[in-house]
């Protein structure tokens, strides 16, 4: 029996009809985005399960080897260079297992959204674009594309038309806006439909962004749940 990655769960109503798997950023933990669920003010008619996985503890090279929660190692100031492919793929596999568990809970794959912030957003893109199951969407916040060179070979037909929301701060000192835009461009060149939003903020989430997330998420789930 597979041991799932540690995580916490939150439901917004009885008998959830959809699932959001939301990954935190480097150095944070699984509780980081729990408070945002209430701020989303999602319709009561959309009972959802939010799953917040906990990244494993690992030494982060760029932080002098300090051990902290991370989905993969970062070795250079230019965070897109020399990616930790082993760490990225291990984290992808952990999210794949959570997806499988939701399927076993009778949640249809197209009612599962992968979401993440910073490193967590990178894993949402990594796992979502390569999933063999048709997912409901990918929400990638303040993040970038890892292992982009392998995407053309590894992307799945099941998610060729997956809705993608990317949002980024124009003053982000951690994940440069230019890197996020170049990641978006790689996705569009691969024929993905990306909804792109910019906000006047640093490496964070702002109120206007939360409102946009709420609208996007409601639209994704409403089409699958309310109109089903």
Image (cartoon, helix red, strand yellow):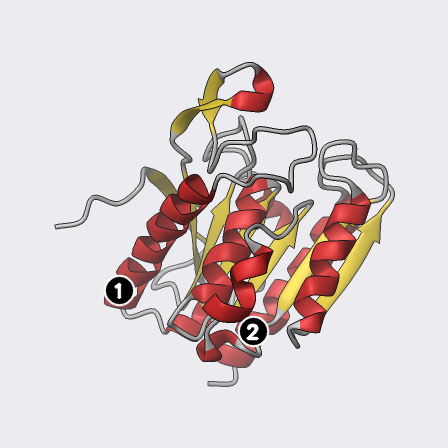
Residue at 66% over, 66% down: 187
Cα–Cα span, label 2 and label 1: 22 Å
Residue 87 position by quadrant: top left
Residue 214 pos. (x, y %): 65, 59
Residue marked by disc 1: 105
Q: Residues within 10 Å of mark 2 (few under 14, many from 20)?
A: many
Name the residue tied to disc 2. 162
Q: Name the residue rendered at 40%, 42% in the picture.
A: 86
Q: Secondary structure at mark 1?
A: loop
Q: Looking at this rendering, what residue extends furthest in the left direction?
A: 1
Task: Say if residue 41 shows up in the picture.
Answer: no
Q: Is residue 218 left or right of residue 225?
A: right
Q: Which residue occupies 20% across, 44% down?
A: 3
> Which tag, 2 or 1, sits closer to the chain's start?
1
Q: Position of residue 127 (x, y in %)?
A: 46, 58
Neighbor class of circle 1 (other Cα within 10 Å; few <14, some 14-19, many 20+) is few
């Amino acid at each position: 029996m597979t041991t799932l990655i540690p995580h916490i769960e939150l439901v917004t109503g009885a008998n959830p009809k959809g699932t959001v798997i939301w990954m935190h950023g480097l150095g944070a933990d699984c509780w980081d985005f729990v408070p945002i669920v209430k701020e989303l003010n999602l319709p009561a008619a959309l009972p959802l399960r939010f799953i917040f996985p906990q990244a494993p503890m690992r030494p982060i090279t760029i932080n002098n080897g300090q051990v902290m929660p991370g989905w993969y190692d970062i070795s250079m100031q230019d965070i897109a260079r020399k990616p930790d492919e082993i760490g990225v793929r291990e984290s992808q596999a952990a999210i794949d297992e959570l997806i499988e568990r939701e399927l076993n809970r009778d949640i249809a794959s197209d009612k599962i959204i992968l979401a993440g912030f910073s490193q967590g957003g990178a894993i949402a893109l990594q796992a979502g674009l390569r999933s063999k199951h048709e997912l409901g969407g990918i929400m990638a916040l303040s993040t970038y594309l890892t292992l982009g060179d392998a995407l053309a070979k590894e992307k799945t037909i099941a998610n060729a038309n997956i809705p993608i929301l990317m949002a980024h701060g124009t003053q982000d000192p951690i994940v440069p806006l230019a890197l996020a835009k170049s990641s978006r461009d790689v996705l569009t060149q691969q024929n993905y439909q990306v909804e792109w939003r910019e906000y006047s903020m640093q490496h964070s989430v702002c109120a206007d962004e939360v409102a946009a997330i709420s609208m996007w998420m409601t639209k994704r789930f409403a089409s699958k749940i309310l109109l089903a």
